Image (cartoon, rainbow, N blue to C red):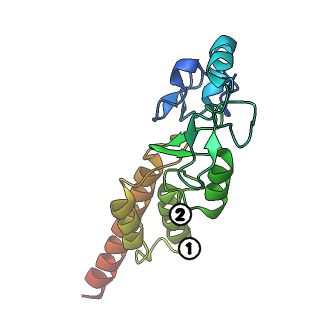
Amino acid sequence: MVNCPSCEAQFRPAVFNSGRPEPCPLCNKKFQTEVFPALTATQEETQRSETLVDEQAGCYFHPAKKAATVCEVCGRFVCALCDLDINGVHMCPHCLETGKKKGTIEALDNSRMLYGKMALYTAFFSFFISVLSGFLAPITFYIIIRYWKAPGSITGSGKGRFVVAGILALIQILVTFFFFFAIITEGS
């Protein structure tokens, strides 16, 4: 079966191909699990529906199995095992792999920019380089405001990094303000 990549707990078949992230039963991290339909089908179902009869079209990858649909990208006939439904588009495994490598399938997330991490690094960098220089703090706030609703990590980390980065940037602005205010009042 399919195990959680984080804690190795086994996923229930009910969460397969749900189209949304589901929590792991043990560690509660959210994962979206997409599997071949044949993984959950019984042996009787696959044998009954896949047997090639008379002049029916066969699967490109499994010539002895009946074609269930056509790949909408390359036009190959594919059986139910090879039919991959990606947001309503039927693909064969070869086209899915090619689209994944080229990054042409918008429904697949091969990588994500972690804006919370970027905001946190910007805040830490500016905070520890010079606490009294609050000039990078607005950049941190810009990242937080601009990317607050952007998709986060695939593993489901929350908005905590944004919050910590915002607190650091706010502290930096306040320290800079009070430092310059103290200089101005001392000079008067």
Q: Is residue 183 above or below residue 74?
A: below
Residue 162 in view, yes or no: yes
**Which quadrant is home to the N terminus?**
top right
Q: Nearer the viewer, mark 2 or mark 1?
A: 2
Q: Which mark is residue 83?
A: none
Q: Is residue 174 above or below residue 13?
A: below
Q: Considering depth in this image, is 37 or 160 the residue closer to the camera?
A: 37
Q: Say what amino acid the circle numbered 1 marks.
A: Ile
Indicate the position of residue 159 as horizontal and vertical percent values.
42, 47
Q: Which residue is drawn at 53% across and 35% down?
A: 32
Indicate the position of residue 55 as horizontal and vertical percent values.
65, 33
Q: Which residue is drawn at 40% across and 51% down?
A: 163
Q: Quadrant of residue 88?
A: top left
Indicate the position of residue 3 as horizontal and vertical percent values.
68, 26
Is label 1 in a helix, a strand or a loop?
Answer: helix
Specify few, some or many for label 2: CA neighbours under 10 Å numbering under 14, 14-19, or 20 or more: some
Q: Considering depth in this image, is 84 or 161 the residue closer to the camera?
A: 84
Specify few, some or many for label 1: CA neighbours under 10 Å numbering under 14, 14-19, or 20 or more: few
Q: Mark 1 points at which residue?
A: 129
Residue 155 in view, yes or no: no
Q: Residue at x 44, y 77 (%)?
A: 133
Q: Is residue 140 above or below residue 74?
A: below
| Mark 2 → mark 1, Cα distance in angstroms | 8 Å
Q: Is residue 78 left or right of residue 140?
A: right
Q: In this view, does 184 lie to the left or right of 61?
A: left
Indicate the position of residue 137 as horizontal and vertical percent values.
40, 70
Q: Say what amino acid the circle numbered 2 marks.
A: Phe
